[in-house]
Image: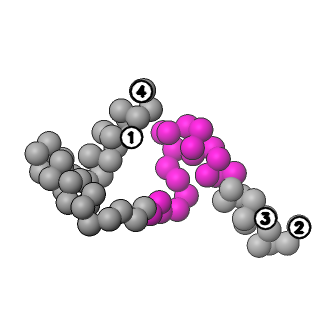
């Protein structure tokens, strides 16, 4: 197994462990594209709730996990 293959395997295992245990951080940034309308709704939600975008995302994700 080459160095690159070992690194890819290591990263894949890190992601798998992080997604199984939400207390662990993902090893790389997670990016998502949203349209302008959804972005405006999200900004409005953050302002109404007096939350940062990171706090709002955590709150939304926590609600999804509980359902």
Say which residue appears at 11% left-offset and 45% top-offset.
48
Front in this rendered view, residue 19 or 36:
36
10 or 51, which lies in front? 51
Question: Considering only order in the chain, which callout, 3 or 1, is on the residue closer to the N terminus?
Answer: 3
Depth-wise, is mark 4 or mark 3 nearer the camera? 4
Q: CA distance from mark 4 to mark 1?
A: 9 Å
Cα distance between the residues tagged 2 and 4 = 40 Å
Front position among marks 2 and 4: 4
Identify the magenta region. Answer: 13-31
Identify the residue under disc 2. 1
Residue at image point 55% right, 58% down: 27
Q: CA distance from mark 2 to mark 1?
A: 37 Å
2 and 3 marks in contact (CB < 8 Å): yes
Which residue is label 4 attached to?
66
Q: Earlier in the sequence, mark 2 or mark 1?
A: 2
- Expressed as whole percent of the image width and height from the top left, the position of residue 5 reads 80, 68
For marks 4 and 3, give the CA distance.
35 Å
First in residue order: circle 4 vs circle 1:
1
Residue under numbered circle 3: 6
- Establish if 50 lies above or below 66: below
The CA span between labels 1 and 3 is 31 Å
Marks 4 & 1, CB-CB < 8 Å contact: no
Residue 62 lies in quadrant: top left
- Secondary structure beneath dot 4 equals helix
């Amino acid at each position: 197994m080459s160095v690159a293959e070992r690194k890819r395997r290591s990263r894949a295992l890190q992601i798998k462990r992080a997604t199984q245990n939400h207390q662990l951080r993902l090893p790389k940034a997670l990016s998502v594209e949203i349209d302008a309308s959804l972005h405006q709704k999200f900004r409005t939600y953050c302002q109404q709730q007096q939350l940062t975008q990171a706090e709002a995302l955590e709150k939304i994700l926590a609600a999804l996990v509980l359902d």
